[in-house]
Image: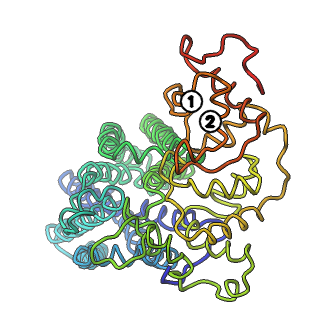
Amino acid sequence: MNYPVWDVLFGSGLLIALVAGLHVFVSHFAVGGGLFLVLTERKARRANDPALLNWLKAHTRFFVLLTVVFGAVSGVGIWFTIGLISPSATSDLIHIFVWGWAIEWVAFFIEISAALLYLYGWDKLPPKLHEWYGWIYFLAAFFSLVVINGIITFMLTPGSWIDVHKFWIGFFNPTYLPSAFFRTAICLALAGIYALITASVQKDAELKARIVRWGAMWTVPSLIALVPLGWWYIHEIPASLFLSARGPMPTATHFASSAWILLAVTFVLMLLAVFTPRRLHLVFAVVVALVALGAMDSFEFVREDVRKPFVIENYLYDNSLYASSMPGDGGFTVDNLSSVGVLHAAHWINQRAITAGNQVEVGHEIFRVECQSCHTPDAYRGIHQLIEQRQWNPATVSAMLTGLSLMHNGVMPPFAGTDAERGALAAYLNSLQTITPNPATFTNGKLMFENHCSMCHQDRPDDPLFTGLDPNPQVAADSLKDLTSLFPLMPDIKLNQTQRTSLVHWLNTQRPAGKPGAASSSATQGGN
């Protein structure tokens, strides 16, 4: 809130994904590919294989151009992007791990220097010295991974750092080790996959076959290892973080499925390459690389999505809004903004809109401050589509804002601001609607549940909505007159008698057989 933020119409999350996805795919190759270079050189020299050495020289040029040039440029692109989209989160990560970043940048300098010496040292340096430059490069690149991994995993599972604010506590967080091993396996797998690209243009069929088989020895075992390592990684992430994956916007669930499917496809394609190595074509090699890119990007989407809406889990939402008061942070929290107002704390907003007092324009500014880190008006994770899909009228939209912390299985942050600001945000969200709600949806019990209750409640017999209501349909319907009396944070949605009766009748059909209130005949299905 205290920095200018770059408004990305199609979604800031997608922009970061586009920039970071390609960078991560290349940077992991930079690690595994470095080890691949030096071990392949050793293999060729021991076997006195000049053909393999000549290919490796060309592969080294491809490697350096891709990892050093594109890797460095895209790395700067990540800093540029996150600095404009989430400036406070970027600032926090720099200050929390300032020495970690300093060490990583030194390692990166050594990495670039060694890579250039290795490239230009072919046929100019003694073989042993040339290999040593390769080892120096790989060790520096791997050390960069070791450092960056601690910072990335900290954002997902900061652990007890939130209480003690100690560098090493945050660095060696609960998912540090599984992530380090998981990413190392990815690095080794990509080394073999990238080797297919330069091998595919070789005219010597015998040499091509040897390179493909050698690359497969890196890729196939690594892909197999990713399965248990992925299981370990997932089980170190608190189960509560995966609740968002089962909400109305299950981005993580979709991409988790994509990651495993694309990983399996990559494995099958590598086996096909091994069985017909002499017929390997550049198009096939590129397809393998693109499928692997899709698998890795899907994994990164899951890692990012389960952390949402936090930028740093359970600590920082976005741009200076903290979950609770943190010693020495001086940031605005959800609690204190409820009294002073979010517009009072947000300096980089359209002051003309605030002064004019137009509710819709004021609400738009609040949306930019509080919602835009995860949502767009009508693109990626669009609020427009969500409201119209659920047939919310203006009164329902306003009521739903009072219970944000219960939505999406409890992962949504509560609204931070005054009642007047909540009303302005509701006015803006209502202005996004382009269709009129269908009255039929308000007399169908199942649709009533899906549109008004499923944001917080699960369609399961053990959900409090099923177990907490009185078995008597009339008594249960009467209790729904005032939802806040059932639970203070419940949205104050006003339902008429027909709507309440339809909803209760449908809920009773979902109770397990034999339980009080369970439907005994189809006549109890009401609006269904």
- Residue 456 place in picture, x, y as percent: 56, 43
Image location of residue 275, percent across then percent down: 44, 34
Residue 158: quarter of image = bottom left
Instruction: Name which residue lies at 55% across and 79% down.
Output: 5
> Closest to the observer: 184 or 30?
184
53 lies above or below 218: below
Q: Is residue 32 left or right of residue 403?
A: left
Left or right placement of residue 430 versus residue 262 in this view: right
| Residue at image location 21% in from the left, 59% down from the top | 172
Q: What residue would you read off at disc 2?
A: 479
For numbered disc 1, what is the local secondary structure? Answer: loop
Residue marked by disc 1 = 469
- Residue 203 visible within the image: no
Q: Residue furthest left?
A: 128
Give the SS element for disc 2: helix
Badge 1 vs badge 2, beta-carbon distance below 8 Å:
yes
Q: Is residue 246 visible?
A: yes
**Nearer the viewer's eye, disc 1 or disc 2?**
2
Tell me the kind of residue under disc 1: Leu
Residue 114, compared with residue 459, is above or below; it is below
Identity of the amino acid at label 2?
Ser
Check the picture and name the quadrant holding the C terminus: top right
Residues 405 and 339: in front is 339
* Spatial CA span between label 1 and label 2: 8 Å
In the depicted view, which residue is nearer to us: 348 or 218?
A: 348
